[in-house]
Amino acid sequence: MGSISHPEFAGLADQIAQLVSEIDIEEVINSKDEAARFKALRAAQKLVIRLKKPGDFASEATSQMPSQIACLCIAINLRIFHCLAERKESSLSVEELADILGIEEDFLRRLSFSQYLHLIEACKQAAGISTLTFTNATGRTMRVIVASSYVDETDVDTYKANPYTIGLARPELESTIKYWSVLFDPLRMHLVNTTRIISLRTNPSILSTSYNHHPNVLLTAPRFFAKEGYCAPQTTHTPCHVARNTNLDQFSWMREHPRPLEEFNTWMSAQELRLPAWTEWFPVRDHLLQSNDLNQDEILLVDVAGGIGQDLKAFQGRYPDAKGRLILQDMEKVVAQAVKDGLPDGIEAMAIDLFDPQPVQGARNYSINAVLHNWSDADAVAILKRIAAAMFSAGRSLLLINDVVLPDRDASIDQASIDMTMMFVFGQAKERTERQWRALLTEAGLSVKKFWSPPSPGKGVVEAVKG
């Protein structure tokens, strides 16, 4: 086979799906020809690796895997599945389960059980249940499980064991997980630090996430919740605070640590290593440049908390004929780094505080990328209200929110893991569903015009207007 061009990826996906459908899972589990099975498995692993971008490896190593292990340990500590095994009902709501366990409902909804489906199957066998239905948005609890193919999602918030679940139903694995989670912390830190040193020699952006969603922060979570109680932590006291031995929140801590702040900004500027920027797939000309009647003194786009200008640089490079001013806003130290690194002509830098009144009034468009998921609902509403107050009404100003829009079902591992990471690092922060985005924007005096889905499971765009 020759090289595969981009249009042929769809055909490749169809071929793989067809091949997967022809594999009998029971035959795999009962296979006596282990040499042939491992040969096929290794070939499949090589295919997966070949389809990854460099940023995918970084995300898996520094966010997904530690988050999954942390959630696994929390579930074991809570004895969630032992509780389920004692229940004889065929369905159990999140409210009922939270009441039995004596924990906060939202915490239970967000807990990503990841790799411990063997416990679910053990519970279901003990209770004589083949399908467990969890209501009231408990789909958040099961996202990582479904994304990992350890259990089937037969309908929204309805799950059924598959042969992988049954095959993993070994109680010995609980002790295995507990034992290796203790060793994982120092090994992880050594691996990340070593890999980071090597990677920085060739591409400084690939693993600069190691400080931000620090594996040590995520792996502190089980001990944190065992001590503090199983509820979403307050913004002032999170696993992040404990792991770093500080009273400062994430952004205050970064302001006092220049190197991690620079790494964060570099990482944010390199998101295209994994997924395409919104400027590549959102219909910019139809929605932001449809009239293009601005003069050079009017403001076309304000990028709120836009880091070191990565989005505006991409926008300017893709639409060089766009009229109007481009304004980059962020906190003072970030803006200083952007200016130091060099901003192209036509992009203005402005230091702001997200919770102060928006200084740029009446711009045609405002954007905010991967910011609101760092904040609680109350803080996110406060930020949005500042932007809304500056916008024209009657749809003359647009707000583009580039952030994850969680699906009701079939969330990716990345989406499910980052939601838990937000809680571990920021406390009340979260990824949001369409329903949650609508409620947030309504409270801020805005309304959703349209949800735009990205070409791959990453950040979408919420297009909003005032009123």
Image (cartoon, helix red, strand yellow):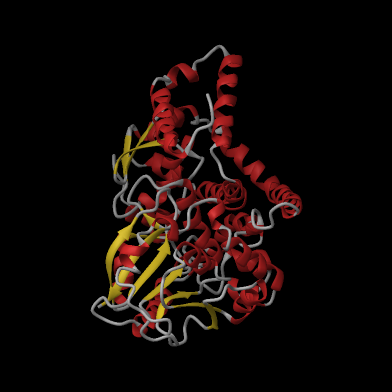
The residue nearer to you, when weighing 39 against 143, is: 39
Whether residue 62 sits left or right of residue 329 in the image: it is right
Res 373 → quadrant = bottom left
Question: Residue 437, how many percent across, how many down?
Answer: 33, 65
Residue 247 visible to the viewer? no
Residue at figure coordinates x 43%, y 49% from the top left: 457
Question: Residue 340, how many percent across, how many down?
Answer: 67, 75
Work out whether 367 lies above or below 268: below
Residue at figure coordinates x 49%, y 60% from the top left: 230
Residue at figure coordinates x 46%, y 39% from the top left: 6
Res 358 → quadrant = bottom left
Res 85 → quadrant = top left
Residue 272 visible to the viewer? yes
Work out whether 203 lies above or below 292: above
The residue nearer to you, when weighing 97 against 319, is: 319
Question: In the orientation shown, which residue stands out farthest toward the front?
Answer: 321
Task: State the count of labels.
Answer: 0
Name the quarter where the C terminus is drawn: bottom left
Question: In the orientation shown, which residue stands out farthest toward the top?
Answer: 32
Whether residue 226 sits left or right of residue 319 in the image: it is right
Question: Residue 61, how many percent across, how many down?
Answer: 62, 48
Question: Residue 278, how many percent across, how many down?
Answer: 43, 59
